[in-house]
Amino acid sequence: MKKKKREEIKHLSQLREWIDLKREFDIIDLFATLHPADIADLIDDLDEQEKIRLFSLLEVEKASDVILELSDISRDQILEDISDKKLTEIVDEMESDDAADIISELTEDQARTVLEGIEPEDSEDVRKLLKHKEDSAGGIMQSELVSIQEDATIRDALEAVINTSDEIEDIHNIFVIDKENKLVGSVPLQKLITSKRISPVIESIDKSIPAVHVDIDQEEVARMFEKYDLVSLPVLDDDNRLLGRITVDDIVDVMEEETSEDIFRIAGLGEDDSIFNNPMESVKKRLPWLYLNLLTALISVFVIGVFEDTIKMMVVLAVFMPLVAGLGGNAGAQSIALIIRGLALGEVTFHNVKKVLYKQILVGLANGICIGIAVGVVAYYWKGMPVLGLVLGLAMILNIFAGTLIGTMIPLSLKWLKIDPALCSNMFTTGLTDAFGFLFFLGLATIFLKFLT
Amino acid sequence: MKKKKREEIKHLSQLREWIDLKREFDIIDLFATLHPADIADLIDDLDEQEKIRLFSLLEVEKASDVILELSDISRDQILEDISDKKLTEIVDEMESDDAADIISELTEDQARTVLEGIEPEDSEDVRKLLKHKEDSAGGIMQSELVSIQEDATIRDALEAVINTSDEIEDIHNIFVIDKENKLVGSVPLQKLITSKRISPVIESIDKSIPAVHVDIDQEEVARMFEKYDLVSLPVLDDDNRLLGRITVDDIVDVMEEETSEDIFRIAGLGEDDSIFNNPMESVKKRLPWLYLNLLTALISVFVIGVFEDTIKMMVVLAVFMPLVAGLGGNAGAQSIALIIRGLALGEVTFHNVKKVLYKQILVGLANGICIGIAVGVVAYYWKGMPVLGLVLGLAMILNIFAGTLIGTMIPLSLKWLKIDPALCSNMFTTGLTDAFGFLFFLGLATIFLKFLT
């Protein structure tokens, strides 16, 4: 892998040199030896003009593989510049799901021209795929598949694979259907090879391969691939008719996408920010979240404002304020991560939610007590003020408990409201835990000071 | 999917009823109709004693599938109770990589007994696998594969698949080797079916399928599956000899595992905490991180301590303190998420790190100015104090800039030190951004107050 990286850098500087010297034939030769994904990596590292130039050197078939592997930014730049004719040729080479993905990124005019330009049958397939929601099973399936009638033999099935192999890549299973195109079952290629050729194909069906409805969310589909160790999954309509198949390579991409989305949302980041974005693009995506954060942080400002007099009487309180707020926030962040992940993996369900909540309450209480006592004792010895130690310790217990509870309840509530729980990003929770922390700490201090004075 | 969930709950209450009534034959009948992954889900939801009882009802072959799909907690509970004889039978049914995973979880005594009990050939395979690091290609590969000499024909290859199919599941590719067991290339089953039977197998090699070295990190392996759309990947030793293969279903699990690890580490959570843990287990895992957080939060306490006199002169400063700290922390969290994800996906490399850093500096500056001006103006009008507005605005600009920079530099530095960048969890960054925030805000206030008095 290290070697690989070094090779990539070598290729890149070589490429730049050849671009400068206009040695296009050398570039074409180099591209012929590389995997489309590696060519895409090289192009991603170039400037806009270089990207467009190099992409134009690729022959149609390779271009159609490369464009799918490019970063979003590079693809946008190339799609803006490309002629309708070349684009149509490129899309015509693609499998239906990839074609639909590219077409959905085009302007309306471009999309219409391409859809009219490609083969009518493909165009029909793509139009159907475009009707499904992008993040549903229908949005990631492809129409290309090998299906065979339920009364066929293994020999028929093998012939079907041979006859379609020119058009369809990555065949892992064939699908057995009845006369109404309803799915009967899936047969892995391994079983086709090992079964007797004269035996009915229906006897070789692998019952452990399930099917999904076209409207299921892609995250659920990914979870099924994980749970049942699938490589290819049939997609059905309401009447169990076979519409398409999802292959595992698309699921791997879905999982990467969902992971980025979750990590970004928890951090309060637009899900499509990327290091490839230009800085002003990033600012536009990140600033709204920070303004939102400003609003949640203002709650704390109001809470502290209420206790200005208390702080005036005992300024050392201001010194310890961030301790209470900070630890409550991070205790909350721990629970958020646990719950969001548990929900994403299907481990937390509304069925076991009470048990989960009860556990988090215990954890919050125990952590609060352990940290609270330590902090209280340290503050007492350090500043020699028993009241400070007592107030700080109590506030810490309350706020770590509250933080844990808030961090558990918010993602669960969002899930219940059918909102992505990752959107309860740390920003909102820390806004709340900060405010509670200050309220507990300064509130307790005010009460104790009253008793003492 | 909704239907599926409802079915699961129905099964669960049915199961509980049957356990109470000791209707074991009904349970065995139900299990016969379910997928091992679904049985595992049901068992996960039971109490410890019920788990052990139900697991004991499974026949060996099904038990060997189910135990692999259980949650870590359930598996531990069952492994603690199971007899050595039954465990040996169960492991003997497994593929080498799964057997190695289970054996690595056993006590030394159990592991020895099992390794001596299973077939000598399997035992040899497993012992070899156990030598590799758990999170390397060697740690996730399996020894079971179909390989064939380079001078063989397609017919020979098909026969090899047929002859091994009883023992080896999930064959997607066969591997072509030379006389010294060095890899020549991979042939997908689809190509075996579509090629002429008398042609040499070497002509059907798919050049786009790469190979990996046995020591490569599993995260790099996952990235290769994603990049090259693989279903199965050969693993080689230093001399390019074929040691095993990695299948995509294991990669899907690796990706889930790495995602959890990243999300948990960013939140400052032991990577193996889980909602299945009992509360005291969770406390043990989470408390050390909170104590660590206490230390980083103490930096802020010291910084504010330095400025106690300034706060005494102008208590309103204490009211606005959390605003500066909070926004700096969240601006930092945004950059952390972006960089950690960019590193994980291989988009951020030491090769483009300067460009990345430069962009983040611009983003930090722009966000800081936008937020700083807004906050400064609001604070000025609200409290009618120009100094407060000026100091707050300036401190905000500086701290959002600092937060963005810290959130970029820390994960990059950790990567450079070969430490997992996700370990620069928000705890450390917010510790730093809090401290810087207070330093900027109170420091500027002290300077301005000196000029004014």
Image (spheres, coloured by chain):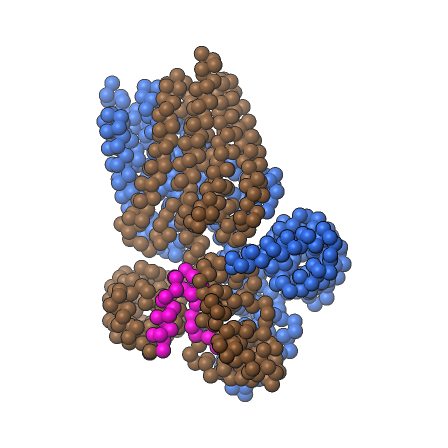
Chain colours: A brown, B blue
Total numbered circles: 0
Residue at image coords 72%, 66%: B119
Residue toward you, B292 or B331: B331
Left or right, B177 with reference to B118: left
Residue at image coords 55%, 83%: A152
Q: Answer whether residue B356 is magenta in the image.
A: no
Residue toward you, A180 or A140: A180
Task: Tell me if I can see residue A246 in this picture.
Answer: no
Q: Residue furthest bottom?
A: B198
Question: Percent x, y for residue B362?
Answer: 28, 46
User: Compared with residue B341, is residue A334 higher up or lower down, i.e. above or below?
Assistant: above
- Quarter containing the C terminus of chain A: top left
Question: Percent x, y for residue B138?
Answer: 57, 61
Left or right, A79 with reference to A440: left
User: Compared with residue B376, is residue B162 higher up or lower down, i.e. above or below?
Assistant: below
Question: Percent x, y for residue B105?
Answer: 65, 53
Q: Answer whether residue A127 is magenta in the image.
A: yes
Residue toward you, A208 or A352: A352
Residue at image coords 42%, 57%: A257
Task: Tell me if I can see residue B56 in this picture.
Answer: yes
The quarter of the picture where residue A10 lies is bottom left
The boundaries of the magenta stretch are: A121-146
The quarter of the picture where residue B345 lies is bottom left
